[in-house]
Amino acid sequence: MPIPFSCAGCKKAFKAPDHLAGKKVSCPSCKVVGTVPATPPDTSSPAVAPVSKLDTETMRKQAQTNGSGKHHPAPPPPPIDPEEQLRREADAMQSLLDDERQAAEASQAKSIDFECDNCGEPISVALDQAGKRTPCPSCARIVKVPAPARRDSADWKAKPQFASAVKLQTEEKPEGAWDATSKLVSREALEDADALPVRKAPVPLGTRVRQYLLVAAVLAIGGVIGLSLMRGRSRTIEAGKVETVLADIADPGKNKLDKAALEMMAARALLEQEIPNKLKTVEKHISQAIAALNESPASTARGLVAADMAENLAAMMGTNEDEKDGKKPQANFLQRTIGTCLGKIDDAEWRLDAWGRICRALLASEQSERMVVLEGQIFRGQARQTNRNNETIQPELEAAAITGLALLEEGNRKNRDDLKEMALRSAESLKSRGEPSTFPSLAIGLYGWRGKELPGSWGVAKSDPEQSGIVLARAAQGNIDAARKIVDGIANEAPEAVRARVALAEGMLVAGKADSDSIKKIVDDVSKLSRGRTMFAMQILRLARVAERSGVPQESLKNLAGTVTGTDSYDVEVRGAILVTSLSRGIMEKQPLDSAPVDAKLWSAWATKTRLALLARAPGGPMGDGQGTELFARMGRLMPPFAIR
């Protein structure tokens, strides 16, 4: 029958098969080795009289001496077959495990019973709710379901008296904490440990847009500052080039005309520099330029250099605020110097051509009122003159007409009624200066523009200037078809065929309708009609001025210069001035400097004024992107030693 016994270590009760009586077995729970009793206690036999302690000791000694009085050890047990030993131990272990399983099943709870932490209400839930959260049926507060309690744990590792190196840590730990047997960590444990990443609230779209704009603004400001610093350094380098060329012509024996032109160019270039006390340096260069101009002998070349200097002086003018801030020279000083330059131009037509360029420079500087005043100061009361074709020139009337037409052109181009009103007053004032029948073509054009109908006496042109004036008036009014009809009715052999086409181009420019293709066609027609006819030199130069501002390609302007074939100084300078407009267009078109059309012998006759014109027309102003000053330096290197004239 089974032998009941208890483990000496964990005190757990077991039943072993009778064949294990007296054998040593290990406890399946705590692994303590113990001995199974030899025989089960016999509860059915009659009671045995108690044996005294002395009798028990005597019996023990007799058993050890076999009654002989001599001590003999107990005989060893008979050997057991190893296979039999393994079988017996396996049967014992299976029996012990079965008993343990049955005891665990009997002790397992069927539900989880606990009390609400808030109101103390008893709560009972199913076992699968362990560790979850459930509402209290009484107070409706959410409480956490505890793990089910085991009443009789057979886990030998939980016994504190048998701790060892393999004992698992069973002390109470935070719920959800990680250990070697856990695969996941609960969110509650991570929250308690502040180990979860902080989720930021989404940023509104408007806020993000403002942030992006702020970053873009910071980057833009940084870029502007960097660009300004780079441009400042570039301008300093360019100014150094200017001074280098000026130093090369410091020799008094070199050409004074070249010195005058280069000193004036340096003044305008340095005016754009951000340097302290720059006005003193600028005025010094202007004074040196005027002194050199006064020392130059009279010639057509001197007149053209003086015209270029006057144009650059006009471009230096600024507002009253600019003068107060030290950004621009005093306007009165510049006006007097412009008058001095124009006084060095002996030919009336060249002086009027220079005045037209001065007008555009003053209008670009927002100096329209000063332009009207300056025109009266310079030209009022000038006597009539005769040009090289024995034609009468009326400087006072033509200068007033040039002023009015420039105002009208600028007003149409910028859509400014104030400039158009000033042009209208200029046109009306012409009547007090002479009879319309004696007006030159420019004056007729401005006078005729003031009203839709021309005077009755102009219905049929009686002279070439009158016919050209009517064409100019019609075109300036915007009536291009009527102007073309007059031009088409003129025979190609007649001198007026060239003058009328020039007037048509000027009128279209004033009306704001001078597109490149239309003006190019007029340029090509005039190039054919005027070739070899020296009488049209100044007319061709006027057309070149219009073509340059209208964007006619550089090649067409070169062809136009080739029509002026005269060999005297007048024609040479006209041809050079037209080529200057061609080079200016080349700068606008990013074309390389090409001096091939100019005879090497004639180069220095107009090279210095070319430098002034290129500087004035370079993109971005006098310094521009470096092109104007770079050409200045290049041409300065080409010319030394300067010719002495």
Image (cartoon, rainbow, N blue to C red):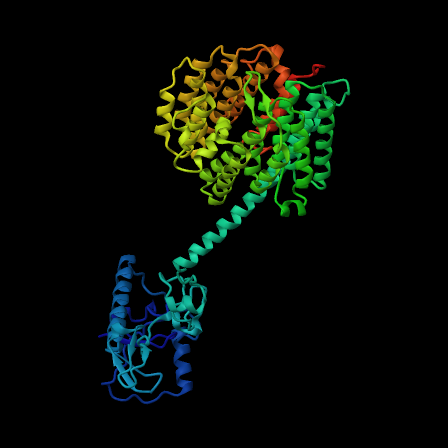
Q: Is residue 581 above or below residue 403?
A: above
Front residue of 523/167: it is: 523
The reply, left or right, for residue 512 in relation to residue 228 is left
Q: Can residue 618 be spotted in the picture?
A: no
Q: Is residue 315 above or below residue 133?
A: above
Residue 287: horizontal and vertical position, in percent? 73, 32
Residue 422: horizontal and vertical position, in percent? 51, 42
Q: Residue at x 77, y 20 (%)?
A: 251
Q: Is residue 622 above or below residue 23?
A: above
Q: Is residue 559 above or below residue 70?
A: above
The answer to which image quadrant residue 593 occupies is: top right
**Quadrant (top left/top right/bottom left/bottom right) for the C terminus:** top right
Front residue of 515/387: it is: 387
Q: Residue at x 54, y 37 (%)?
A: 432
The answer to which image quadrant residue 493 occupies is: top left
Residue 269: horizontal and vertical position, in percent? 64, 33
Q: Can residue 554 be spotted in the picture?
A: yes
The reply, left or right, for residue 427 in relation to residue 568 is left
Q: Residue at x 40, y 21 (%)?
A: 521
